[in-house]
């Protein structure tokens, strides 16, 4: 591993990456491939000897170095997260209008559903999206994905996020919100404490069909 990997023992680095227009124009498969290539490049920054195994429906796995990674993307944006400290999960979504209350109740806890529904209509979309990316990040960190019903644990909608998040069976996770214009994003860690979260960028990522996105930051 490179000297840059030393900090990952107590830090998590999150890379926000804007997918180029020509990649977006080629559709979902091209965006997914570009996001995966960006994660490969990020891992190589810390451990050039390692490689990432990408499998549909499962979190990426680093072989050849003791690194934990997670990847999420939309049609325009990818987020890659990496650490040596603990299992990690990340998610990002563009802010959209909140679904009807009946749909919220299938995705959020009763208390979260009530909290979103009590807001002004103009604020519900961001609050729902914030709760959803937190849940996705926690599920990824725990390694269970949507096999665990997201109604079974609570992340809340307020800032800062609820700490720690308790999953069925007693496992706990810690969530850190990430700020990026037009989106909600979160990174989660298994355990009752989070490592220091730092946002990174690198112009060499343009080789993979993506460009670094400035202005993103961690919000505790």
Image (cartoon, rainbow, N blue to C red):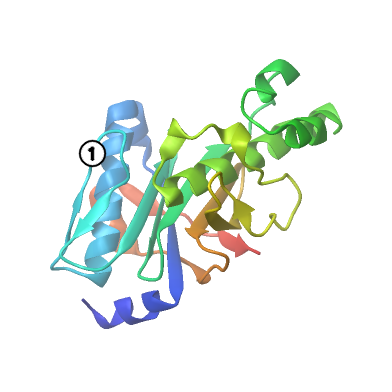
Residue occupying the point 57% across, 34% down: 150
Residue occupying the point 51% across, 41% down: 136
Above-or-below relation of 26 to 174: above
Image position, residue 147 (x, y; %): 43, 32
| Secondary element at image label 1 | loop
Image position, residue 94 (x, y; %): 57, 36
Q: Nearer the viewer, residue 95 or 107?
A: 107
Above-or-below relation of 167 to 122: below
Asked if residue 197 lies left or right of residue 49, the reply is right
Image position, residue 182 (x, y; %): 62, 42
* Residue 74 seen in the figure: no
Q: Which residue is mark 1?
A: 55
Would you identify the image quadrant in which residue 48 lies? bottom left
Above-or-below relation of 119 to 69: above
Residue occupying the point 27% across, 32% down: 30
Q: Nearer the viewer, residue 202 or 47?
A: 47
Asked if residue 63 lies left or right of residue 20, the reply is left
* Residue 139 seen in the figure: yes
Instruction: Locate the C terminus by quadrant.
Output: bottom right
Q: Nearer the viewer, residue 172 or 210?
A: 172
Mark 1 Cα shell of 10 Å, populated few (<14), some (14-19), many (≥20)? few
Asked if residue 199 lies left or right of residue 87, the reply is right
């Amino acid at each position: 591993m490179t000297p840059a990997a030393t900090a990952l023992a107590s830090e998590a680095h999150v890379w926000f990456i804007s997918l180029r227009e020509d990649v977006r124009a080629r559709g979902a498969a091209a965006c997914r491939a570009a996001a995966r290539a960006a994660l490969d490049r990020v891992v190589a920054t810390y451990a050039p000897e390692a490689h990432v195994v990408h499998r549909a429906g499962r979190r990426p796995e680093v072989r050849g170095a003791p690194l934990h990674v997670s990847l999420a993307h939309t049609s325009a944006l990818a987020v890659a997260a990496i650490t040596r400290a603990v299992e990690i999960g990340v998610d990002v979504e563009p802010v959209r209008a909140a679904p009807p209350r009946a749909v919220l109740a299938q995705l959020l806890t009763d208390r979260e559903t009530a909290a979103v529904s009590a807001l002004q209509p103009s604020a519900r979309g961001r609050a729902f999206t914030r709760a959803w990316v937190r849940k996705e990040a926690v599920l990824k960190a725990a390694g269970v994905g949507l096999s665990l019903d997201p109604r079974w644990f609570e992340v809340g909608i307020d800032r800062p996020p609820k700490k720690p998040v308790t999953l069925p069976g007693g496992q706990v996770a810690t969530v850190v919100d990430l700020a990026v214009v037009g989106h909600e994003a979160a990174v989660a860690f298994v355990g009752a404490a989070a490592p220091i979260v730092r946002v990174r960028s690198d112009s060499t990522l343009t080789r993979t069909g993506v460009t670094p996105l400035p202005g993103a930051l961690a919000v505790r």
